[in-house]
Image (tube, rainbow, N blue to C red):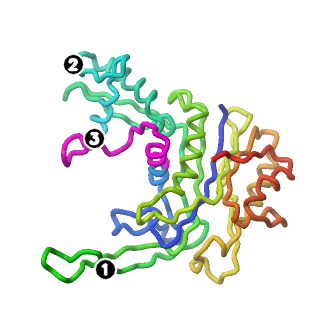
């Protein structure tokens, strides 16, 4: 396994890609640049939910109610993995603190794909005076996603389906903040050195990519419905520890509108990947493979060539890049 870079583009229409709970759940905005921001935590939640709900994978970071109205904290969740060799729960009193830590470490990595991918800090407590933790640096790291264009928040008011209280005729009012459109650009790195400690496998990476693409497409909550994956690049290098870096910053969009904020659809723009492809060509001797997935209808541009997403592999092959289509 060698170093890889990821670039992932998806868009959202008339929805809220990532609300800020400290600011009326408004979409997160870089106010100076007027760009939409989506946290890496939100993206990882998308991946986790897909792997749990659709791929039957065990996930460490999830809400579990152990009593009515009571949610597990991280310490209790970790104790779910205090298991004997037959997979049965063990009592804390039967083990020393170091033995607990080793047992949980092994079982969490064996069972939880999200920890193998993203790492985590896991508290361990045998008693109030005997505490420790497991700290794992995740081999997969994402930066915050940023829109490729300026955006403008819209405030929407409406009525709810129910009366404000029993016996009343007046319905409740609801307010929400949305973005009419946002094309979001995420950048990530897969670090082969950290992968050794978390035991991340090539199959885990395949699940990660599937979670990125299909997880985004399958979000059905009211605020997230309508998100669509548009473009995914995975560039794997053949030199240990080598990577180009900042591939996401080599992508721009082009459109004929007078203002970015008037964008409402993917059909109104083209994604120009010329600079990214040029730098990949310049570093081709250090690239082992390029794996891609693309929305067939996406308008793309590489220098003077303009084409639909369905022709991406063909166009990259014509440039003699080692490209293949991801099977997602």
Measure the C-alpha gap from mark 2 to mark 1: 55 Å
> If the image is split into quadrants, where does the N terminus sit?
top right
Percent position (x, y) of residue 239?
73, 34
Among numbered discs 3 and 1, the one appearing first in the sequence: 3
Dot 3 lies on which element? loop
Around disc 1, counting alpha carbons within 10 Å, would you say few (fewer than 14), some (14 to 19), or many (20 or more)?
few
* Residue occupied by mark 2: 93
When the figure is inspected, residue 138 is found, relative to residue 104, above or below; the finding is: below
* Residue occupied by mark 3: 73
Among numbered discs 2 and 1, the one appearing first in the sequence: 2
Percent position (x, y) of residue 89?
29, 24
Q: Can you tell which of label 3 and label 1 is closer to the viewer?
A: 1
**Closer to us: 293 or 289:** 293
Percent position (x, y) of residue 245?
66, 48
Please, which residue is most extreme toward the left here?
167
When the figure is inspected, residue 13 is found, relative to residue 235, above or below; the finding is: below
Is the Cβ of the residue at disc 3 closer than 8 Å to that at disc 2?
no
**Closer to us: 262 or 328:** 328
Is the Cβ of the residue at disc 3 closer than 8 Å to that at disc 1?
no
**Closer to us: 89 or 279:** 89
Q: Is residue 300 magenta?
A: no
Q: Residue at x 51, y 71 (%)?
A: 32
Dot 2 lies on which element? helix
Dot 1 lies on which element? strand
Among numbered discs 3 and 2, the one appearing first in the sequence: 3
Q: Residue at x 82, y 54 (%)?
A: 314
* Residue occupied by mark 1: 159
- The boundaries of the magenta stretch are 47-71
């Amino acid at each position: 396994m060698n170093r890889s870079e990821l670039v992932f583009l998806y868009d959202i229409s008339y929805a809220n890609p990532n609300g800020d709970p400290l600011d009326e759940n408004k979409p997160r905005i870089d106010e100076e640049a007027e760009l939409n921001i989506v946290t890496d935590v939100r993206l990882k939640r998308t991946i986790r939910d897909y792997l749990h709900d659709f791929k039957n994978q065990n996930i460490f970071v999830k809400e579990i109610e152990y009593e009515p109205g009571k949610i597990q904290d991280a310490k209790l969740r970790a104790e779910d993995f205090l298991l004997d060799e037959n997979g049965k729960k063990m009592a804390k009193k039967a083990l020393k603190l170091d033995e607990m830590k080793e047992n949980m470490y092994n079982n969490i990595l064996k069972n939880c794909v999200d920890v193998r991918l993203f790492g985590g800090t896991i508290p361990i407590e045998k008693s109030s005076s005997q505490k420790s933790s497991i700290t794992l640096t995740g081999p997969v790291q994402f930066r915050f996603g940023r829109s490729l264009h300026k955006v403008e928040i819209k405030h929407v008011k409406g009525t709810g389906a129910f009366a404000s209280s029993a016996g009343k005729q007046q319905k409740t009012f609801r307010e929400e903040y949305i973005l009419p459109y946002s094309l979001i650009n995420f950048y990530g790195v897969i670090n082969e050195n950290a992968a050794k400690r978390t035991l991340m496998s090539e199959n885990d990476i395949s699940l990660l990519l599937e979670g990125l693409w299909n997880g985004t497409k399958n979000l059905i909550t009211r605020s997230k419905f309508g998100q669509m994956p548009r473009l995914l690049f995975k560039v794997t290098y053949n030199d240990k520890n080598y990577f180009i870096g900042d591939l996401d910053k080599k992508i721009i969009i082009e459109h004929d509108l007078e203002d970015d904020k008037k964008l409402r659809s993917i059909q109104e723009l083209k994604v120009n990947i010329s600079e990214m492809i040029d730098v990949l060509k310049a570093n081709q001797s250090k690239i082992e493979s390029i794996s891609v997935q693309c929305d067939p209808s996406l308008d793309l541009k590489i220098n003077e060539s303009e084409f639909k997403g369905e022709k991406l592999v063909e166009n990259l092959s014509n440039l003699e890049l080692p490209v293949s289509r991801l099977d997602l």
